Amino acid sequence: MPLEQCWQTRLCYLLWCVWAQPICTVTSFINEPTMFSQQPQDLVVVAGQPVTLPCTIPGYHGVVLWIKDGLALGVGRDLSGYPRYTVIGDHGSGEHHLRIQRVELMDDAVFECQAVQAAMRSRPARLTVLVPPEDPVISGGPVVSLRAGDPLNLTCHADNAKPAASIIWIRNGEVLNGAMYSKTLLRDGRRESTVSTLYLSPSNIETGQQIICKASNKAVPNGKETSVTIDIQHLPLVNLSVEPQPVLEGHPVKFHCSAKANPPVTLYRWAKGGSIIKEVSGDTYEVIVDHSFFIEPVSCEVTNPLGSTNISRNVDVYFGPRMAAEPQSLQVDLGSDAVFNCAWTGNPSLTIVWMKRGSGVVLSNENLLTLKSVRQEDAGKYVCRAVVPRVGAGEKEVSLTVNGPPTISSTQTQQALHGEKGQIKCFIRSTPPPDRIAWSWKETVLESGTSGRYTVETVNTEEGVISTLTMSNIVPADFQTIYNCTAWNSFGSDTEIIRLKEQGGSQGSTGSTFLFFKSRDCGFPRCCKHVQKHTNAITLKRMHTTLVVYSMKTNALSEMLLLA
């Protein structure tokens, strides 16, 4: 581009003089037509907010200037003279957006984006800055005193706003009419101050009334407000303070009842939960608080010759969980719903957690725990626990008993040594308890006692019933026989088929241990492994939720929680 054309703009001339570089002769960037894809637009913004003026020139790689009211802000992206101004965007894509942080009144101007070497300028964009009024002030507030029968003149001013603030007066939610209104332009020629005066006749005012002055403009359409209270001779105006708050149960607090009254106060009277506190007669009441102060307010009644004013406060007492509704243990039939109700009070707000004993799963965070269509594996102990953060915790345990048919758990193949005494076992859970347990094989059925080489024994445990079929002098035919363990109760029956397998290894073992597990997936305990105990250690290759161990040597059943 010829130098004479470049000098047609003051900005190019400025660059030439300051940097003394032939920037006007750079032509590599104008091989293709250049135009704005984004230009700044007129914007209205509230002082203190950020704003971005867009400018995008695809394919242009020359110098871009931002102009404010005809003056350049800087060269390219260097706006070091304006700390709140930043040029942002992808330079390679031709983005040269002007970002203004915390807009001020001085930013109220016309802005242009100019591509110097391309001799292009954007449309001028007017940035209009709105300034909210300062907080309105009522002269003589916040309490305006006057004698009964005197008229009331209130003056409210809202200063330094752009545009000028509008002022309205409000009493009891209604706008008061008849106010005088004036405004003054400030020296900067942009901001204005507004003054409004309200006159009320004696018949139109009452003691204790609150009158609000509300100022608004486009910058704060919801407005700012302040108020005054009219102080004529009146009933006592009372404030009741409690210190300290919050406070832990069992600690002292001090109530102070301060009152303003015309005529003066003649009597203080204290009460708690509606009951008079006879031993206190002054404006101060000190006491050790308990949880009842949280729900039973303390009141102070102040009297003067015109009457009495009563004010009350609850104390923010922190106390641990206290049971309001105690849950009850339940016994329900299989498939029915079980509903537990557990209610606590506490402060601060407490958290309720329902869990099954031995499980880390949270079942409910409400007062009610509802178990739909219960299954037999739902039976057990349930805990309702309440926690008040940083104060304390409490819990209540209940039992759920599920009535249903028996459930038999056993390994389907158990082991014995040829020529030795052998045993096969089945583990029965049943609520109600089983009415009958029977072993059957071939043509034989045996419920208890001894028949030939066979003996049936039943052991009751807290977890259930273990029925054992003992065979003396194991013969080869025993390994070919199918054994059935069957249990009945009033809800039904269950049967487990067991086979006996010949066991190899050394003789003279000291005892056997049977392992059963309970899993939420299968729902009922299953015998997971039969281990002949030749060493002091038993290794399980698979871990389950709950492991039930039965020892033939000690004839004992134990249960432990395993983490898979």
Image (cartoon, grey):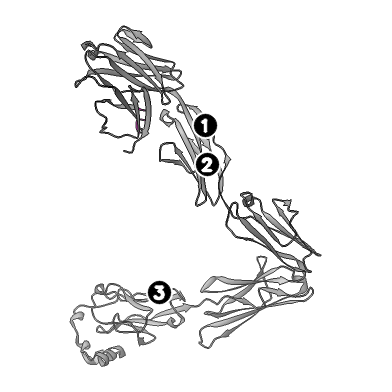
Amino acid carrying mark 1 in the image: Ser
Contact check, label 3 and label 2, Cβ < 8 Å = no
Q: Nearer the viewer, mark 1 or mark 2?
A: 1
Measuring from the top left, give residue 558's x and y in whole percent.
37, 28
Mark 2 secondary-structure assignment: loop
Q: Is residue 138 magenta?
A: no
Residue carrying label 2: 367
Measuring from the top left, give residue 294's x and y in whole percent.
62, 52
Residue carrying label 1: 329
Q: Identify which residue, 453 or 3, lies in the foreground.
A: 453
Amino acid carrying mark 3 in the image: Val
Q: Is residue 288 above or below residue 199?
A: above
* Image quadrant in which you'd find residue 43: bottom left
Mark 1 secondary-structure assignment: loop
Residue neighbourhood size for the residue with mark 3, other residues' Cα within 10 Å, grouped as few (<14), some (14–19), many (≥20) = some
- Mark 1 or 2 closer to N-term? 1
Residue segment shown in magenta? 521-525
Res 368 visible: yes
- Kindly report the distance in space between the C-alpha atoms of the residues bearing marks 3 and 2: 51 Å
Question: Farthest residue toward the right?
Answer: 305
Mark 3 secondary-structure assignment: strand
**Mark number for residue 51?**
3
